[in-house]
Image (spheres, helix red, strand yellow):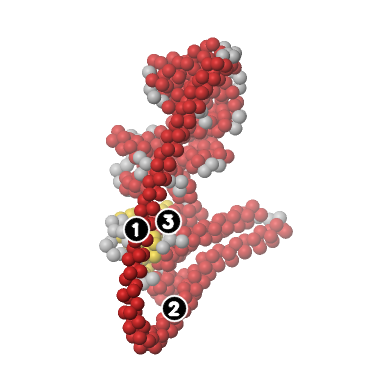
Amino acid sequence: MYKGGYLFFLLLISSILFAQTPDLNTHLATIEKSNAHQAAVIELKKILQSANLTVTEKIAVQTVLVHKYQQLKQWDICLNYCQAQVALAHQQNNSLAEATFYKLIGGTYYYIPQKENAIAYWKKCIEIAESNKYNVLLAQCYHNVGVISFEGADYQLAEKYFIKAIELSKQNNDTASTTFSLHYRLLATTYDAENMLDKAEKIFKEIIAKSRAAKDSANLVESLLFYTNVLKKKNEFEKAILFSQEALAIARKINLIDGVITALNTHAGNLAGAQNYKDAYKYKSEEDNLVRTRFSGDLNKKISDAEAAFKTTELQHENEIATIQSKKEKQVYLIGFAGLLILASFAVFYFYQKRSVKQKIQMQLQVQEEKERLSRDLHDNLGSQMALLSNNVESLYTNYRKQMGIDEQIDRVKATSKQLLQTLRETIWILNKEQVSATEFFDKLVEYTHRYLQSYNQVKLITFENFTGNKMLNSNDALQLFRICQEAITNSCKYAESEIIELHGQTQPDNFDIIIKDFGKGFDAEIINTEDHYGLKNMKLRANSIQAKLVIEAITGIGVTVTIKI
């Protein structure tokens, strides 16, 4: 009752804590509760394109977006998005956004689950939040770390973090909220687990009194049942029986089915502890019957659904048999006609045989051309990165022999390996999809650019989107277009010395336009037509292979603009 659910509750409600506009706050709460997660992602992205959002409103919208990625179990997209936002927040010196996305990364790892990583990122959030007094984030992360510590039976650490969360709630005058009650109840449960029963009892009594005053029946049922566990440990079975009986009565009254089942189980246990086995058996039997009835109802529904599906399939099978029989009757008439067609077919066989041979030759040429394209793609991207990785490993070995610069070389090897793996993932992602929408492609390009710019902290990325059509790309066109963009981004970062890179993506009825623009030192436009610049030459070859229009405008001292239209 007190494990993952309490952490999930805080992760859920945290999405609306930053929103400043009541209308936006209400709208985000509605989106958060919606089960149409994919549609919610599209709507949230549209909201983020609004220029009227404040910093805190934008963080609130992004938080709900991350929750939707989590509910869709799109873990890679979720983590990449959060990491990109952390890098951007760090560049912009936005400590609130940086701490928030650290918290969201921790929440994602909790769901995967990788709880050690979750704690590590929550502690990063705590470090920033403590120095900047972001008390809302602090209370959430203290609670989250406390829950995981409790699950790992580290009760002293759990107690420490729950107390911190409670103290922050008091400072914020938040003692009447559900979250404060949650902190307080978990602290009492921790004392119970540590056998500090007097402390646990004192807290549970306070929670029960507040729940009665607030007429919070669900919270009262749960608190009463937790409290009976303390009473049982103190051998006060009569009191435990009274409280579990009250909890059962309330759960029945508000028709809280799960609460009734739990209360029956707890009450039966309390009666057994008091050696009243007859009544304990009665309540345990009622619990078993309720569980069985509930399971039977679910099972009967599944059986009914299965029977309906079977009948539908049976009807379809009968229709198929009738269709086959009808076809057999028609075959009798068709056989005679087919004989005439066979004679006619022999007459044109020679012509079609020649045509078939020609088509086979064309197909072989196309296959060979595709092999050469893939070979060039692997050589241009994976080949160069493998060569760099090999050089870094060789340099690392040499420095190891000399005991010089080992850490720096290891970092280079790790970075090159990571980039190589990501290139493979991107290639596989594109090749595995028959079609890629312009929106998906641009999101992937922005994600790649954010990751690539982590090695160029001085460069800021600005994106512009205007997608009104539904332009689709096949996998080959998408891969070649992605490589052209990669080369343009790489050139801007390595040679332009620009502080800003702009990515523009827009669709028109039949076109998809991408513009990559920097404001660096530029170059002489005449070199585009020379054979010595293989990167620019390959960009043109790739563009021609997919019938895309590539325009490179370069002005010395002004910058470079690369425009691709497909």
Residue under label 2: 363
Distance between mark 2 and mark 3 Cα atoms:
32 Å
Residue 381, visible in the rendered structure: yes
Viewer-side residue, 432 vs 307: 307
Question: Quick check: 21 above or below 192?
Answer: below
Q: On the picture, is 445 further left or further right than 229?
A: left
State the residue position of label 1: 319
**Closer mark to the observer between disc 3 and disc 1:** 1
Residue name at image x 31 percent, y 35 percent: 26
Name which residue lies at 35% across and 82% down.
339
Which of disc 3 and disc 2 is earlier in sequence? 2
Q: Quadrant of the C terminus?
A: bottom left
The first of marks 3 and 1 along the sequence is 1
Q: For the residue labelled by badge 2, is the local secondary structure a helix, a strand or a loop?
A: helix
Residue 124 lies left or right of residue 560; in this view the side is right
Secondary structure beneath label 1: helix
Give the foreground label among 2 and 1. 1
Q: Which numbered disc, 2 or 3, marks the residue closer to the eye?
A: 2
Residue 342 or residue 3, whichever sits in front:
342
Report the amino acid beneath label 2. Answer: Met
Picture quadrant where residue 115 is located = top right
What's the mark number on residue 348?
Answer: none
Residue 340 point in image, percent of width and height: 33, 83
Q: Amino acid at mark 1?
A: Asn
Looking at the image, residue 396 sits to the left or right of residue 150; the answer is right
**Foreground residue, 289 or 172?**
289
- Residue 430 lies, in percent from the top left, at 45, 61
Is residue 391 or residue 445 the one in the foreground?
445
Q: Which residue is mark 3?
A: 444
